[in-house]
Amino acid sequence: MDLLLPLDAEAPKRAQLERRLREAIRAGRLKPGARLPPTRTLARDLGVSRGVVVEAYEQLVAEGWLTARRGAGTRVANHPATGPGPSHKLTSTPGPGPVPKTVEIGEGPDPHLGEGPGPLLGEGPGPGLEVRYDLRTGRPDLSAFPRALWHAALGRALRTLPDRELGYGDPRGFAGLRVALAEHLGRTRGVVADPAQIVVTGGTAPGLAVLFAHLRRQGARRVAVEDPGWRGPRRAAEHAGLEWTPVPVDAGGLVVDALPDDADVVVVTPAHQFPLGVVLAPGRRARLVDWARRRGALVVEDDYDAEYRYDREPVGALQGLDPDRVVYAGSVSKTLAPALRLGWLVAPAWLLPGLAREKDRADRGTPTLDQAALADLLARGDVDRHLRRTRRRYRARRDTLAAALAEHLPTARIEGASAGLHLLAWLDPHADETAIAVRAAERGVAVDRLTTSREQPPALLLGYAAEPEPALRRAAALLAEAAGQTRRSS
């Protein structure tokens, strides 16, 4: 099982680990009954000795935070500090738009867009051209999809789901999946969520469409988006009748000081910015949350590929800094497969009633059987194991592509965190990335170009997850051929 527990380099590791675990349990990121990773696994992930983890677990067992039983592993105890999550009656907190003092969520308030970030920047290889090497962004390795596990999970769902679950259910989604997601996201991403605050969607883009439609009804007018960035939020904003404003991104992520005063919402990719690959700097994370508090605005955190960080532990979700001001959005499109069309929004309590009604109006709910299958895989730890396998695979492919570019196209400069499913290659300042992309497509290599409303050096976005290492090496050589025959006219 994955567990997000960043440790400082200086402080004693055992004391840090104990403190981090207590904090995660108190905050509800680790739910009662949640199983912790085996001591050897967690020690390897944290880069500490197994004895450090063993002693930390033993101490927390002695304090009553954890329980340990032979054959059942180490789990979070039903500690009074955690207890069950809030009931379906949620007390609202101040937010934009009129909000009742208390709201009731029952079994249901009432008895487009492509997934992304993904293939949005390049124009594709063009008609009549064969794609031999697909280096476009947003594409996981679909051959890695756990077909047998998914088939078994669907079978278990069909055998065990009560008949009533086959009807029109809660528009927020299948309760079993929301419980599993709350545990998984709290444990792996530091998200603070009660299952009642999760809305299951058909992916990130449909989730944004529902969210923006509701915010428009509440009086929102303008959405700030990253520039350069995924154009999904822009499309969703336009579809909902909202205006959008580009905000620049630099080496520290979104330039918070450039946010417009009249923005009601800002959409960010803080863990691994798309497409530049940078991480939102710690100081900017704090300033962004402070901006939202002062403005009475909302931050939408698109955590599209944060599970894939190769050089260090990923930073925790921005949502953990202020769950009342940040909506957390995610999906399985990069971790399992886009074809599943499953995603989620973790929303503040004050936003839930209207958001659930909007979801009900939009589609009457997301397919329950698929939700039940995903809940089953999460509960059994199959998703964690799948992520570990694909992390190793994607890291090897990223390293292979980076080395091949260094060999065949040494003028290209790779920047951004070692993470995700794509890398950004800055080209020679005189290169014409459009012409290079066209010539690469003629050779069977499909790539995306970097496009932005601001003046930027030429660059290509290169996805590496969908192709094996030998194909990546051949694609890099062909890309170098294409670059060698194109130069921007002076």
Image: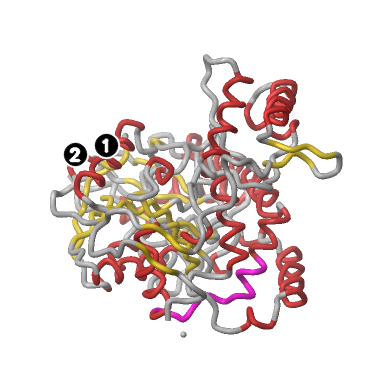
Q: Residue 16: horizontal and vertical position, in percent?
A: 57, 23
Q: Residue 131: horizontal and vertical position, in percent?
A: 51, 65
Name the quarter where the N terminus is drawn.
top right
Contact between marks 2 and 1 (CB within 8 A): the answer is yes
Of the image marks 2 and 1, the number of the one nearer the N terminus: 2
The answer to whether residue 13 shows anywhere in this view is yes
Instruction: Identify the residue at horizontal 47%, vertical 57% (top origin).
Output: 330
Which residue is tagged 2?
Answer: 257
Instruction: Identify the residue at horizontal 35%, vertical 40% (top origin).
Output: 426
Q: Residue 91: horizontal and vertical position, in percent?
A: 38, 57
- Residue 137 lies in the magenta stretch: no
Left of 93 or right of it: where is 188? right
Chief secondary structure of the magenta span?
helix
Instruction: Identify the residue at horizontal 41%, vertical 74% (top origin).
Output: 359
Left of 125 or right of it: where is 251? left
**Number of other residues with Cα within 10 Å of mark 2, as a class: few under 14, some 14 to 19, many 20 or more:** few
Q: What stretch is highlighted in magenta?
A: 362-373
Q: How far apart are marks 2 and 1 (CA)?
A: 9 Å
Instruction: Identify the residue at horizontal 62%, vertical 72% (top origin).
Output: 370
Q: Which amino acid does label 1 sit on?
A: Arg
Which mark lies nearer to you, 2 or 1? Answer: 1
Q: What residue type is labelled 2?
A: Asp
- The label shown at residue 95 is none
Closer to the camera in the image, 411 or 142: 142
**Number of other residues with Cα within 10 Å of mark 1, as a class: few under 14, some 14 to 19, many 20 or more:** some
Which residue is tagged 1?
Answer: 287
Name the quarter where the C terminus is drawn.
top left
Closer to the camera in the image, 464 or 62: 62
Q: Residue 424: horizontal and vertical position, in percent?
A: 40, 44
